[in-house]
Amino acid sequence: MSMARLPVEADDRESKKAKGMASPIIGFSDEDKVGTIQPHDDALVVTLRIGGYDVKMVLVDQDSAMEVMYPDLYKGLKLRPEDLIAYDSPLVSFEGKTVTPKGLIRLPIQIGSDIVKVDFIVVDAYSPYTAIVARPWLHALGAVSSTLHQKVKYLSEGRVKEVIGDQVVAWQCMVSTISRQSSTEPSTIAEDGL
């Protein structure tokens, strides 16, 4: 008795085709806005596990080409100058001043079971944020961010996973920046001698 059987190659193609059809797609819809305050112009500020610690006030900036770490996080992680690799390309701070970095350090960022190592440029400058994660992190994770929806989405273990932004913290960071600018800018009243 003989049975007809498809060649192995055809079985593999069908299996791959079925798997490809089941692959989730990363996207955003109006449902992703549920739980956010709309309309808004808030930055996307999240909490991430960096170097083994939960770090709040991390700005997700898809327009930036590098990850940046500010003094509070540097001190909080108990990093020392000898932990840093030399890096001397100047950067421009939030206040518009040129800043020479203290150095560079490679640290893991963990979300659930997903870990991506990124290079942080360490600067000694004011920022309302503890760190900025940028395109290198987003691309390494295969993530897409949306400030409108206040989320970062990425594929992991065959599912779309999310990191949700915190609009209250984003607002606090903005207020901190505005307050700092107001206190450092000379008053026109004082200049006029009134």
Image: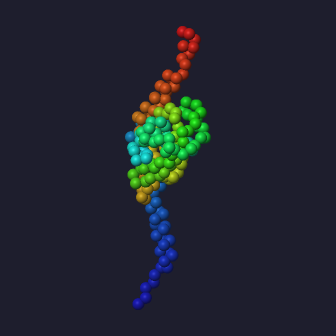
**Left or right: 113 as drawn, with respect to 70:** left
* Above/below status of 54 relative to 179: below
* Above/below status of 73 relative to 188: below
**Left or right: 98 as drawn, with respect to 81:** right
- Whether residue 43 is visible here, answered yes or no, is no
Exactly how many numbered labels are in the figure? 0
The x, y position of residue 99, in whole percent, is 57, 34
Q: Quadrant of residue 165?
A: top left
Quadrant for the N terminus in the image? bottom left
Quadrant for the C terminus in the image? top right
The x, y position of residue 104, in whole percent, is 53, 44
Q: Residue furthest top?
A: 194
What residue is at 54 percent from the left and 22 percent from the top?
A: 185
Q: Which is nearer the eye, 30 or 57?
A: 57
Q: Quadrant of residue 151?
A: top left
The x, y position of residue 36, in whole percent, is 41, 39
What residue is at 56 percent from the left and 38 percent from the top?
A: 101
- Whether residue 80 is visible here, answered yes or no, is yes
The x, y position of residue 45, in whole percent, is 45, 39
What residue is at 50 percent from the left and 22 percent from the top?
A: 183
Q: Which is nearer the eye, 98 or 81?
A: 81
What residue is at 40 percent from the left and 47 percent from the top?
A: 52
Q: Which is nearer the eye, 122 or 173?
A: 122
